[in-house]
Amino acid sequence: MSDLAATKDLEMISLRAARSMGTGFAWPTILTLVFLYAAGGLSLAGAIYGYIPLWLTFLINTYVAFGSYTPLHEAIHSNVSKKTSIWANRVTGVLASWLFMHNYSLHRQTHLSHHANLNDPAKDADHWVAGKSWWSVALRCMTIVLSHYALGYRLSDRRVITAGVIENLMPVIGVAVLGWFAGWQIALFGVLLPALMGSALLALFFDYLVHAPYIYGVSDRYLNTRVYLPPRSMRGLVTCLWFAQNYHLVHHLYPWVPFYKYGRTFRQVLPLLEASRSPVIVLGLRAG
């Protein structure tokens, strides 16, 4: 059997395995969103009533903002609910986007364009983070939302733009009310700065690290995205904290797989990835 035929067989086997990873209703995604709202709300309440310092609220809510992208991302790919109303995905996406002062409707346009036009500077908003030095990458990560808004408005019709603006207004109103009753420090360090820093972390961990060095396009499907394997002793923790995006290549190959099944899917399709020379980066001497 030729190498090409063998690879085709591996592709079919891997595709069948990935299709079996789909889900009807993604309860872990919903529970993740509920947990993030609870953590963010409790940390704000703790700062307002003086139970915890404001710097701790800032750190907690930065991670809440970072984590909120996962249910938003799942909703964009209709991974919250495959068989029930599309509103399950939309409501989940909208609620998740509010945790980092963003919106579902415009981001859905830019993220789907990211998948269809990976590493195309004109059509992939995430390509914005492809700086040429560490400090330019850092600055670009801090301003990633500007890239998404610019492309989102360009890609979207009036109906989608209107929906995005309305969705954005809700968290803005919420922050204004919070600032009025609890003070500007709470609004700034409890919501606004965490949203900014959370977005920057998303740009670093969901965009730059998993797509650098940005030399492959959408047609190079086995080469344009990375997998990171931490040492076995830390793999579960790192995967949890990274919301499984250390397996980001799995998502690009099989976007219908929910994030909490990335690791299992990776193990199923590893022979194909090895045959395709996909970038699987092993971290640590004993990663195994």
Image (cartoon, rainbow, N blue to C red):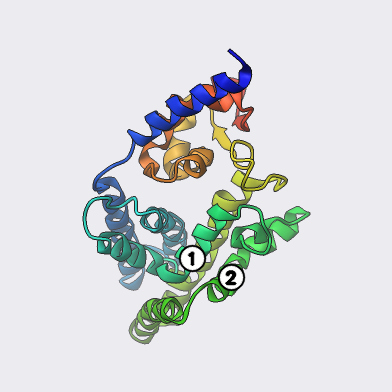
Q: x, y (%) of residue 230?
A: 54, 31
* 27 lies left or right of 207: left
**What residue is pinned by disc 2?**
151
Q: x, y (%) of residue 45?
A: 30, 68
Nearer to me, 90 or 55: 90
Residue 37's place in the image compared with 21, above or below, is below
Residue 223's place in the image compared with 55, above or below, is above
Q: x, y (%) of residue 89?
A: 31, 59
Res. 31 mark: none
Furthest residue in direction bottom, as rendered:
180
Furthest residue in direction top, as rendered:
1
Q: Which amino acid does label 2 sit on?
A: Leu
Q: Residues within 10 Å of mark 1 (few under 14, many from 20)?
A: some
Quadrant the N terminus occupies = top right
The reply to whether residue 102 is in sight is: no
Nearer to me, 179 or 118: 118
Nearer to me, 82 or 245: 82
Furthest residue in direction right, as rendered:
132
* Residue name at image x 63 percent, y 46 percent: 211
Residue 56's place in the image compared with 155, above or below, is above
**Helix, strand or loop status at disc 1:** helix
Q: How far apart are marks 2 and 1 (CA)?
A: 9 Å
Circle nearer the N terminus (2, 1): 1
* Residue name at image x 62 percent, y 63 percent: 123
Do the CB atoms of the residues marked 2 and 1 lie less than 8 Å apart? yes
Res. 109 mark: 1
Quadrant the C terminus occupies = top right
Q: Which amino acid does label 1 sit on?
A: Gln
Q: How crowded is mark 2: few (under 14 residues within 10 Å), some or many (20 or more)?
A: many
Nearer to me, 284 or 263: 263
Q: Residue 282's image quarter? A: top right
